Image (tube, rainbow, N blue to C red):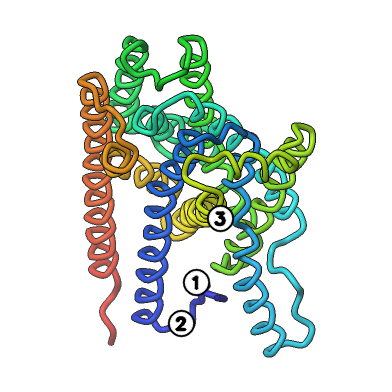
Amino acid sequence: MDVEARKDAPPARGKAMHRFLVALNCGMLALGAIGGPLLSRLYFSKGGHRQWLSAWLETGGWPLLVVPVAASFLARRARDRGAPVLLTPPRILLAAMALGVATGVDDFIYAYGLAYLPVSTSAILISTQLAFTVFFAFLVVRQRLTAASVNAVALLTVGAVVLALHVSSDRPPGVTRGQYWLGFTLTLGAAALYGLVLPLVELAYKRAAGGGRAVSYALVVEMQLVMGFFATAFCTVGMIVNKDFQAIPREARQYELGESRYYTVLVWSAVLWQCFFLGAVGVIFCVHTLLAGILIAVFIPVTEVAAVIFLHEKFSSEKGVALVLSLWGLASYSYGEWSEAKKQAKKKREGAAAAAEAQPAAP
């Protein structure tokens, strides 16, 4: 678990481990980005109506991380009896606590919006998170804006506007026009807030790496554990105030799919959402913030198809246009980043070759 960028690590081994971590976190992000929204909407569509409970489930998978964090500590303690319990510096722990509360707020806003929207519509709206991530990454971590970034932002914005212009054809049964607009607005707000959280997580990593300290994957998992705990704590307060804990047994008995499946939906929702959050922060650690935002947008069409197949949602022409615009924006951004990466790699090779030629020959 203590995977870090050590200068004395064999290059081949380091590259292999990096590829493994990238693949692992992309896989977890895919599971969470697709399965999490589907199970949350399944909860609401079959008789669930507790937004605080849904938000609590999105954050409640953090106990799964206790095992790897404990294993990391035991491994460090075996090498060094004086090893600290946590690798994360105190000031970064405080930042993780604040980010956890912000994540809890974001989860509640998202859950509240999803209660009034189809998964397919919510997924397209959440794709605007890439636009917010690009904007906040520019402000927070000085990520450079390119023509491809601006084009992606414009296309995603137009896609959201297309959905907004066709409210009546998209409302789930029993949802009023006012509730639909509330869900629409809250989902965009959730996209904006999480678009801010992702660059702040990357900024926390940079601060943790201050003073020559290596940022390990174990530290990433620790941060996610702390963030998950405080996000859950925030949602727990909301559940207590709303008396959701007392309502769970009653809601389970009235659930359309049956009491046992009610609890199955709740448990797997917590697990899959934790995969999403751990995968997102892992991708940020392994690569950068914008890749996490891109991957979340990549899984939109899969979520769309899954919602139509498993939840029998309508896929209107307006959703099709919005989806095409979203994918167009994503493709534009991805191609721009790929082209820029090739240019930078070419410059580095040319610079290295020029430096080698400039060195005096050995006598």
User: Which badge, 3 or 1, is on the more N-terminal residue?
Assistant: 1
- 79 on left or right of 162: right
Q: What residue type is labelled 3?
A: Val
Percent of width and height locating residue 356: 26, 70
Q: Residues within 10 Å of mark 1 (few under 14, many from 20)?
A: some
- Quadrant into which the N terminus falls: bottom right
Quick one: quadrant of the C terminus? bottom left
Relative depth, front residue between 219 and 308: 308
**Mark 2: secondary structure:** loop
According to the picture, the residue beneath numbered tag 2 turns out to be 9
Rendered residue at 45%/40% (across/down): 42
- C-alpha distance separating marks 3 and 2: 40 Å
Q: Residue at x 28, y 37 (%)?
A: 308
- Count of numbered labels shown in the rendering: 3
**Above or below — where is 267 with respect to 241?**
below
Q: Which of marks 3 and 1 is in front?
A: 3
Q: Mark 1 is on which residue type?
A: Ala
Q: Give the alpha-carbon distance from disc 3 to disc 1, as whole Å.
A: 35 Å
Identify the disc placed on residue 5. Answer: 1
**Residue 88: mark:** none
Residue at 67% across / 45% down in the picture? 249
Identify residue for label 3: 267
Residue drawn at x 63%, y 77% as measured from the top left: 72
Q: Are marks 1 and 2 in contact (CB under 8 Å)?
A: yes
